[in-house]
Image (spheres, rainbow, N blue to C red):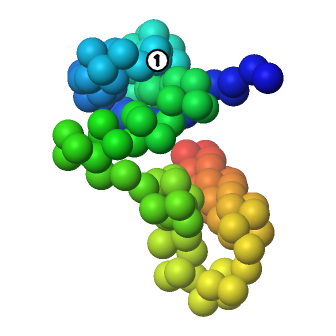
Amino acid sequence: MEDKIVEIARFYVLEKAELLLSLLQSEGIECYLRNEYTTQVMGSINVGGIRVELLESDVPRAMEIMEANGYQLPAEDEEPEQIQAVSSWARHIPFLRNSSLEKQIIIMFLIIAVLLALFIYLGSLLSS
C-alpha cells in the first residue's frame, strides 16, 4: 500500500516554512515545500501559501516534533483561516448569518459585483 502525501502546515512567509522543513528533515522525516516558488513569483497574489508536505505515515511523529518545538497544532475541527475570515464578515450581515458557507460566498460576491457595477455606472455619469 502506498502512502499518500499530505499537508502538515501552511505558511505565508517562506522563512517560517523553511524553518519547519529544516526541523523535520533534521529529525529524519522526508518532507518538502509546495508552492514555494509560485508564492515568490506571484508576490502579493495569494496562491494558498507555502505548504509543508510529507508522507501520511510520518504525520504522527511530525506532529510530536512540531508540538515539542512550540508549533501550535490546529484542532481537528478547526476551520482554515480563509473560511474563518469569510464567516466573520458574514456574521455582520443579518440575512447571511444562518446560511451555509457556499451561499454566504455567492451572496457576498453578488453584492460586491452589484456595488462595483453601480460605482462604475455612476462614475461614467459624472465624467460625461
Q: Is residue 46 visible?
A: no
Q: Is residue 43 above or below residue 87?
A: above
Q: Which residue is mark 1?
A: 31
Q: Is residue 119 visible?
A: yes
Q: Is residue 28 above or below residue 11?
A: above
Q: Please state if 19 lies on the left or on the right of 84 as rendered.
A: left
Q: x, y (%) of residue 3?
A: 69, 24
Q: Name the amino acid, label 1.
A: Cys
Numbered circles on residues, count: 1
Residue at figure coordinates x 62%, y 84% from the top left? 97
Crowd class of label 1 (few under 14; some 14 to 19; many from 20; radius 10 Å): many
Residue at figure coordinates x 73%, y 80% from the top left? 99
Q: Is residue 94 above or below residue 78?
A: below
Which quarter of the rendering shows the N terminus?
top right
Q: Secondary structure at mark 1?
A: strand
Q: x, y (%) of residue 48?
A: 52, 34
Q: Quadrant of residue 4?
A: top right
- From the viewer's side, name the closer residue of 28 and 77: 28
Residue at figure coordinates x 63%, y 60% from the top left? 112
Outermost residue to the front: 1
Q: Quadrant of residue 27?
A: top left
- From the viewer's side, name the closer residue of 27 and 15: 27
Residue at figure coordinates x 30%, y 51% from the top left? 72
Q: Please state if 122 lies on the left or on the right of 84 as rendered.
A: right
Q: x, y (%) of residue 45?
A: 47, 28
Q: x, y (%) of residue 117?
A: 68, 54
Q: Is residue 102 above or below residue 80?
A: below
